[in-house]
Image (cartoon, helix red, strand yellow):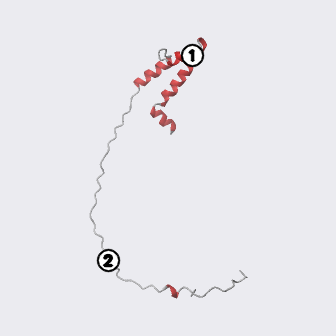
Amino acid sequence: MLIAVLGASGAQWGLLQSVAWTTMLINNLHAASLRQAVETTFDGKHPCCICKAIAAAKKTEKKNVFVVQLKKFDFVSEPFQFVFQSPEAFYEIDSPSKFLPDVSHRPPVPPPRAV
């Protein structure tokens, strides 16, 4: 996924340009001092064959222009009327006290030791 994003954003040209500059710097160091080699490499007046190829490829590269068309969403809401209706039949629910034991008594004091 990362490679696809980098390829789509044109990062390959930056990578190739870095390789070209490194190669140029190494070649220039054989013939000149460090200061002169750095100046010659990065001044833009002495491009190597890789730099020329990269510049030509950038010019011929087709730029993809994406047109974003925003569409308005039309939500159709039909008016509705909510009507409460009573059930046709209903049953009385017994009181929960019929099913649960009477828990109104107090716990024994002191608590049982068996627990």
- Contact? badges 2 and 1 (CB < 8 Å): no
Give the distance between the C-alpha atoms of the residues marked 2 and 1, in whole angstroms.
92 Å
Disc 1: which residue: 35
Taking 96 as reference, is 45 above or below it? above
User: Observer-nearest residue: 40 or 11?
Assistant: 40
- Could you tell me residue 89's position as x and y percent? 37, 83
Q: Quadrant of residue 28?
A: top right
The crowding category of the residue bearing disc 2, from other C-alpha atoms within 10 Å (few below 14, some 14 to 19, many at least 20), is: few
Task: Please tell me the numbered disc located at residue 88.
Answer: none
- Could you tell me residue 82's position as x and y percent? 30, 70
Q: Secondary structure at mark 1?
A: helix
Taking 52 as reference, is 1 above or below it? below
Tell me the residue at 49%/20% (across/down): 51
Disc 2: which residue: 85
- In the current view of this chain or complex, which residue is farthest to the right? 114
User: Mark 2: which amino acid?
Assistant: Gln
Q: Quadrant of residue 104?
A: bottom right
Horizontally, is 104 left or right of 5 in the view?
right
- In the current view of this chain or complex, which residue is farthest to the top? 31
User: Observer-nearest residue: 103 or 68?
Assistant: 103
Taking 84 as reference, is 55 above or below it? above
Q: Secondary structure at mark 2?
A: loop
User: Observer-nearest residue: 47 or 32?
Assistant: 32
Tell me the residue at 41%/26% (across/down): 61
